[in-house]
Image: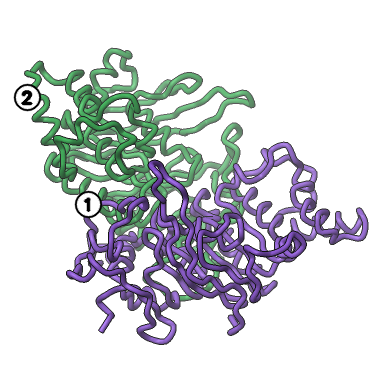
Chain colours: A purple, B green
């Protein structure tokens, strides 16, 4: 069960990238959230909304433009080299594309053992071999697979290797960036089950990013919805589906197709008009205003702030400002 | 309703380095006029190759085997010459591809790309008339600023807009059959909903049939009339949407339906998975291809290919469990 201990605190995080003509692409703009020990926080949003950039900045893979990210109370962007090294052992990542994120020249053994070697976790070669074999079995592969090359594996198996690599250093925090979107439906279920099983066994804390809402809802305890660099809603995953507050969340949820002809026919659909505006020069005021069916005058002038309307349910929308 | 397209015993092989890949193995199904048929299955099950076969786009080392019949409006098109194919494609039958950015020509303006299709097929009309047709088509697909859009290049448009252009190109010559190969996979859900609604509206207006290829069962439930489930190059089950979703017969269809988490259901229980991987298609199993991953597999499954059995006039499946000799109700449900 998730505890009340904060593992990661993100405070007013901003990440801008330089764009043409001295403009700035505001990929992540003033986002704040906490991740508690043992929970899974899912972040959903459409492509280009900044969810991956947000995750990567939280892990220190990008420098911040402004704001801070605290891991166990320590700012990860001002860490010394030594602290940073220790940080990489506690935090690991699983990538989207299992075909691109594994070195095709390396044997599976070398891929998994690399972290163990770097952090000096095994006393000798025999122990290292034992550890790799255990990791492979933990993710549902065989110990014999260690001697093989990556290209001999299917997509689902490769993703398992990626998970074994991430778990090799016994991390406490796992960042999963769309770990299943490159896989087939039946394989997706395998990987999701594996991640949920491992989380229980090892009491992992996870930041889970995906655009597939049904998967995120299945795996997450809480969900944050992002739109154009902003977090617009954050609440428990069961609540988000039953009682979405932000108009964007409502539209997003109504657009997800349901694999049931009757439920699908009865479902009320909110059809959004137009496309997501560019994060270079985003609109003034609420960023969703141009596509919103509840747009008011104030929405085009003033940016809504994130407020807690019910305990644990945060929304950034003028509809809920009294 | 008349059958627009009938596939009869179609088989496609690819001569590869490691042996012959039997991508499509003796499949038969039909599409009625104005109907939406969804072809469902995992990657590598042969669904895209089936679509390419209908368009005559199977190239070497692929080969449509002897005995395959593709009957379109009463004519067997399987043995068309390349000249006949060129007349057929775009006019009778069009295709939308998955990735609109790589399918559009990056160096050509949108207007010209759509006009190309008219130049190839339509009877000669004046330039103004053609331009008007293009603009009308663009408006039909939901592009507001159609006149301006003609002068743009693909890179200036968003993913959803590009997919609309693809649809406009495919539909400008009013084909009778539209093949949509994962038309919304690269798009976001809100844009996907827009495109699907657009496609449904256009289908009604132009009275065309759609062959939709997808792995997303949610989309299938939303738009399809009939579902064809493929596994390892074979059709394992075929039926109407309600039959497949509410009364699936084949274990693979059941597993596929159970493996997707549902947004409208609560619960953190484990998802049903299909263990293992799809078989090697250079050497497909002698018996049922799903046998190795099937929770109900019997001895006979590995030995002999199951025959096709009919459940109702529109519902058929190939599974040994349906044989009258199989134990009824005695099979443990995994």
Q: Where is residue B46 in the image (x, y as percent from the top left)?
A: 46, 37
Kindly identify the residue that appears in the image at 20 percent across and 67 percent down. A295
- Please name whichever residue, B29 or A41, is drawn nearer the observer in this view of the structure: A41
In the rendered image, the residue lying farthest to the front is A22
Q: Name the residue under label 2.
A: B129
Q: Mark 1 points at which residue?
A: B197
State whether residue B214 is above or below residue A83: above
- Please name whichever residue, A247 or B271, is drawn nearer the observer in this view of the structure: A247
Q: In this view, does B12 lie to the left or right of A68?
A: left
Q: Are marks 2 and 1 in contact (CB under 8 Å)?
A: no
In the rendered image, the residue lying farthest to the bottom is A311
- Please name whichever residue, B299 or A189, is drawn nearer the observer in this view of the structure: A189
User: Circle 1: is it few (<14), some (14-19), or many (20+) Cα within 10 Å?
Assistant: some
Q: Position of residue A272 (x, y in %)?
A: 24, 58
Q: Where is residue B244 in the image (x, y as percent from the top left)?
A: 35, 56
State whether residue B217 is above or below residue B3: below
- Secondary structure beneath dot 1 equals helix
Query: How many marks are shown on the rendered structure?
Result: 2
Quadrant of the snapshot with the C terminus of chain B: bottom right
What is the chain letter for disc 2?
B
Kindly identify the residue that appears in the image at 53 percent across and 55 percent down. A180
The residues tagged by marks 2 and 1 sit, at their Cα atoms, a distance apart of 28 Å
Dot placed on the residue nearer the N-terminal end, 2 or 1 = 2
Q: Position of residue B281 (x, y in %)?
A: 57, 35
């Amino acid at each position: 069960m998730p505890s009340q201990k904060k593992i990661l605190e993100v405070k007013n995080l901003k990440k801008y990238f330089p764009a043409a003509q001295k403009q700035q692409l505001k990929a992540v703009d003033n986002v704040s959230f906490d991740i508690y020990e043992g929970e899974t926080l899912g972040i959903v949003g459409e492509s280009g909304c900044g969810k991956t950039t947000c995750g990567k900045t939280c892990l220190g893979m990008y420098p911040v433009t402004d704001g801070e990210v605290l891991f166990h109370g320590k700012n990860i962007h001002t860490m010394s080299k030594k602290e940073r090294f220790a940080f990489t052992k506690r935090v690991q990542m699983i990538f989207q594309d299992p075909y691109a994120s594994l070195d095709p020249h390396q044997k599976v053994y070398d891929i998994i053992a690399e972290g163990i070697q770097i952090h000096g976790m095994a006393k000798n070669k025999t122990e290292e071999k034992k550890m790799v074999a255990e990791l492979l079995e933990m993710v549902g592969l065989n110990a014999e697979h260690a001697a093989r090359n990556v290209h001999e594996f299917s997509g689902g198996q490769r993703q398992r290797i990626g998970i074994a690599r991430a778990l090799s250093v016994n991390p406490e925090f796992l960042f999963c960036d769309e770990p299943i979107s490159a896989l087939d439906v039946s394989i997706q279920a395998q990987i999701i089950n594996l991640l949920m099983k491992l989380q229980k066994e090892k009491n992992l804390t996870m930041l889970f990013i995906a655009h597939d809402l049904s998967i995120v809802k299945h795996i997450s305890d809480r969900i944050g919805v992002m739109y154009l660099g902003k977090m617009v809603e954050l609440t428990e995953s069961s609540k988000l589906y039953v009682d979405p507050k932000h108009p964007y969340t409502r539209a997003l949820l109504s657009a997800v197709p349901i694999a049931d002809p009757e439920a699908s026919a009865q479902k009320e659909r909110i059809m959004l008009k137009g496309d997501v505006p560019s994060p270079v020069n985003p609109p003034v005021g609420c960023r969703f205003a141009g596509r919103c069916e509840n747009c008011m005058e104030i929405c085009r002038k003033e940016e809504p702030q994130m407020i807690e309307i019910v305990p644990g349910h945060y929304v950034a929308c003028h509809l809920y400002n009294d | 309703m008349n059958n627009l397209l009938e596939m009869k015993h179609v088989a496609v092989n690819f001569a590869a380095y490691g042996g012959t890949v039997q991508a499509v193995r003796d499949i038969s199904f039909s599409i009625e006029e104005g109907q939406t048929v969804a072809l469902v299955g995992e990657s590598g099950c042969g669904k895209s190759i089936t679509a390419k076969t209908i368009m005559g786009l199977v190239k070497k080392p692929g080969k449509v085997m002897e005995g395959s019949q593709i009957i379109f409006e009463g004519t067997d098109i399987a043995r068309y010459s390349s000249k006949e194919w060129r007349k057929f494609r775009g006019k009778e039958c069009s295709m939308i591809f998955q990735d609109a950015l790589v399918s559009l020509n990056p160096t050509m303006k949108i207007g010209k790309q759509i006009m190309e299709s008219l130049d190839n097929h339509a009877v000669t009309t004046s330039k103004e008339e053609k331009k008007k047709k293009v603009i009308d088509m663009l408006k039909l697909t939901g592009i507001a600023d159609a006149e301006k859009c003609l002068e743009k290049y693909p890179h200036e448009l968003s993913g959803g807009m590009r997919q609309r252009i693809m649809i406009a190109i495919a539909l400008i010559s009013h084909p009778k059959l539209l093949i949509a190969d994962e038309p919304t996979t690269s798009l976001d859900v809100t844009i996907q909903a827009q495109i699907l609604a657009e496609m449904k509206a256009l289908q009604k207006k132009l009275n065309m049939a759609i062959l939709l290829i997808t792995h997303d069962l949610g989309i299938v439930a939303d738009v399809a009339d009939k579902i064809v489930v493929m596994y390892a190059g074979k059709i394992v089950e075929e039926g109407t949407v309600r039959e497949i979703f509410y009364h699936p017969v084949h274990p693979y269809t059941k597993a596929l339906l159970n493996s997707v988490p549902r947004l409208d259901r609560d619960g953190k229980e484990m998802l049903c998975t299909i263990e293992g991987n799809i078989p090697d298609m250079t050497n497909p199993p002698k018996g049922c291809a799903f046998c190795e991953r099937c929770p109900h597999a019997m001895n006979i499954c590995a030995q002999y290919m199951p025959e096709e059995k009919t459940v109702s006039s529109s519902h058929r499946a190939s599974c040994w469990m349906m044989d009258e000799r199989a134990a009824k109700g005695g099979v443990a449900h995994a």
